[in-house]
Amino acid sequence: MITNILLQAQGPMGGGMMPIFMIGMIVVMYFFMIRPQQKKAKEQKLFAEKLVAGEKVVMTSGIHGRITRTNDDGTLTIEIDRNTNIVVERQAVSMEMTNAFQKRAGIDTAPKVVA
């Protein structure tokens, strides 16, 4: 009985709108979910590549420190306390947490223009 009611309730447009509806949902998912994540990942990668010695950073684990050296193998040496250094991957530095820390501390995060 219920299956007969569901089968009869197709509507005036029939089943031709279903593929258009599905394509529309995929487009919406792309612009609201996939594209922003790709953009954020690209910004994080660019941020990690531009890290230089002397910058105060925050790791994704919450550890605060200052970059003392950038290594050739893609790692950073970070001083977390006097005479206490750790070596971490560049991607372990959190862009959001570092920018929030620098904003709270009053550190200028604007790009420096060298003439």
Image (spheres, rainbow, N blue to C red):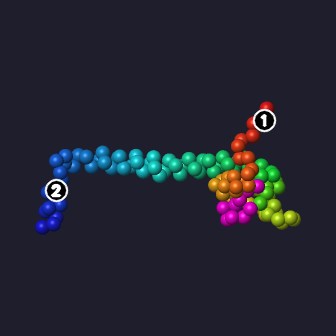
Viewer-nearest of discs 1 and 2: 1
Residue farthest along the top direction in this orientation: 115
What mark, if any, has residue 8 been given in the picture? Answer: none
> What quarter of the picture does the N terminus occupy?
bottom left
Magenta segment: does it hold 59?
A: yes
Q: Secondary structure at mark 2?
A: loop
**Residue displayed at 56% across by 47% down:** 39
Residue farthest along the bottom direction in this orientation: 1
Residue 17 lies, with reference to residue 78, above or below; the image says above
First-in-chain label (1 vs 2): 2
Magenta region: which residues? 56-64
Q: Label 2: which residue?
A: 9
**Residue displayed at 16% across by 58% down:** 7
Amino acid residing under circle 1: Val
Tag 1 near tag 2, CB within 8 Å: no
Q: Label 1: which residue?
A: 114
Q: Quadrant of residue 78?
A: bottom right
Tell which of 19 and 108 is nearer to you: 108
Rendering coords of residue 67 (x, y %): 79, 55
